[in-house]
Image (cartoon, helix red, strand yellow):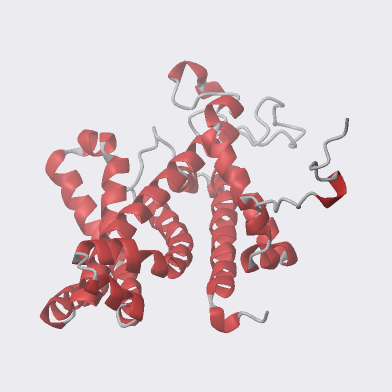
Amino acid sequence: MTNQNQTPASKMPEVETVPTAWQRFKDTHIWNSFIKDRVAQISLTIFMGYVIMALFAPVIAPFDPYDPTQMDIMNSELPPSWDEEMGEEQFWLGTDAQGRDLWSTILYGTRISLTIGICAVLLQATIGIIVGLIAGYRGGRVDSILMRFADVQLSFSTMMVAIVVLAIFQASFGTELYQDLAMVMLILVIGIAEWPQYARTIRASVLAEKKKEYIDAARVMGLGQIRIMFRHILPNTLSPILVISTVQVANAIISEASLSFLGLGMPVSQPSLGSLISSGFEYIFSGAWWITVIPGVVLVVLVLVMNLLGDWLRDVLNPKLYKG
């Protein structure tokens, strides 16, 4: 017998499907802008290629530039493999003055340069966000003192501060210790020298946010200042932080390369893109142009795509430029 109370399938209420996070993201302005911007797509693809090569350098690289047993001085200054007279197939980008495979060295060098750039920006952002939040939220004398301190910091260029600090450290503690701590020192110097960029940007955003009603409601509920700053104000100021961070990573990589070129960066035994350019510069006029030119092109492309991504993020996250 058929149950008379059974509801026909055609009359069953439709269950609303909850969109996934990916579906919600595809409906955002950021995604719609990205799929229409060919420059942003190419830039992100190239940057992700750099990141993948850096992460998997030990797997991709045919040689280990840190292993002395894989270096042969007899293979030094070999041109790229497309040079039919002198090039060898196993060294498709040639070798440097120490006989290291240049392709393998670039992979490891990109890894070091990206690590320094990202870690230095994380340090900048941490210091700058804390200072900016406190200055903007507290205001008054605290704001004046912190911002004057930031103004003093901005009056010194990053390169000048880095050269003085690193030169004093190297002269005081010796070259051997400096080479062991070169990466840590570069991260600290570049990170500490650039924090005012974040502090001033966050402070301006906090000054606008703290006057809104949801902040007044949080105060009425008895929430503490730290919770209000980090749980309520900070999430609403992340857009400019993302834009600044993209550009600042590129600037940090350039700073590291410049310091390495001056002999105050990564040692030759731990190649970064900057130290590779520096080590090959003296051979550029003797015919071994690839030792400097190829890492230089790699560095220029990396910085270029990061700046292009920063410009795209700035346009997308700026509501005044949104055209609907």
Residue 181 location, quadrant: top left
Q: Taking the image as drawn, is residue 288 in sight? A: no
User: Residue at position x 75%, y 32% from top?
Assistant: 85
Residue 26 image point, x, y percent: 68, 59
Q: On screen, 82 above or below 134?
A: above
24 left or right, relative to 66: right
Q: Is residue 250 above or below residue 176?
A: below
Check the picture and name the quadrant holding the N terminus: top right
In depth, the one of 254 and 32 nearer the eye is 32
* Residue furthest out toward the top: 69
Image coordinates for residue 17, horizontal then vertical, percent: 69, 51
* The quarter of the displayed image where residue 24 is located: bottom right
- Is residue 126 something that shows in the picture? yes
Image location of residue 235, percent across then percent down: 39, 64
Q: Nearer the viewer, residue 197 or 116?
A: 197
Q: Is residue 2 left or right of residue 53?
A: right
Give the residue displayed 38% in from the left and 52% down from the top: 256
Does residue 122 lie above or below 226 as drawn?
A: above
Residue 66, image x, y percentages: 44, 25
Residue found at x 62% / y 32%? 78
Whether residue 102 is situated above or below residue 280 in the rendered picture? above
The quarter of the picture where the C terminus appears is bottom right
Q: With 13 as the anchor, is 214 left or right in this view?
A: left
Q: How many marks?
A: 0
> Residue at the location (68% across, 54% down)?
23
Res. 228 image quadrant: bottom left
